[in-house]
Amino acid sequence: MTYVFLSLAILVEVIATLLLKASNGWEKVEYGSAAAFLYVISGILFSLVLKNMGVGVAYAIWSGMGIALITAASVVFYKQVFDYYAIAGILMIVSGTLLITLKSSVVLQ
């Protein structure tokens, strides 16, 4: 169940970040308000993860996967273009996240 909560926390945080971008600096208050609400939900889900997983490892997974998903979403929704260095960096983040998740003995307490 820990990984379900973590996956949901990541997904909700990614949606919140996309809504925050859509708010255009809070010019569209409804998007900004929805983003703030979803950040709270993501935080609550993440707190449930922390009951069974160390904070350092959980945050590394949460932030690493969040970065990768936001990057992919920004390409799809906002037509953002990345150079090879950015792509290589994101691939290293994803590789590190997978390494921690799949091989580390410190993931679950």
Image (spheres, grey):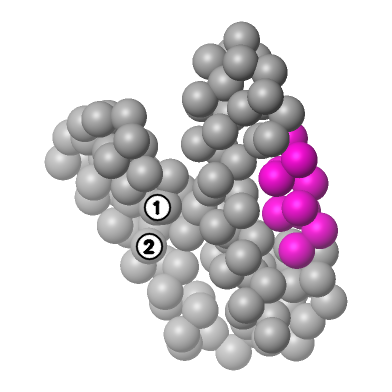
Image location of residue 50, percent across then percent down: 79, 71
Which image quarter holds the N terminus? Answer: bottom right
In the image, 26: left or right of 97?
A: right
Q: Which residue is mark 2?
A: 94
Question: Which residue is at 76% across, 40% downward?
Answer: 37
Residue 40 is one of the magenta-drawn residues: yes
Question: Which residue is at 21% across, 40% downward?
Answer: 85
- Distance between the alpha carbons at the discs numbered 2 and 1: 7 Å
Rendered position, 30 above or below 85: above
Q: Residue furthest top?
A: 27
In the image, 10: left or right of 91?
A: right
Question: Which residue is at 23% across, 46% downward?
Answer: 87
Say which of 34 and 14 sits in front: 34
- Write down the quadrant of residue 16 in the picture: top right
Which segment did they paint magenta? Answer: 36-45
Question: Which residue is at 25% across, 30% downward?
Answer: 79
Q: Which residue is mark 1?
A: 68
In the image, 99: left or right of 54?
A: left
In the image, 22: left or right of 29?
A: left
The number of discs equals: 2
Assign a secondary structure to mark 2.
helix
Which image quarter holds the C terminus? Answer: bottom right
Amino acid type, label 2: Val
Amino acid type, label 1: Ala
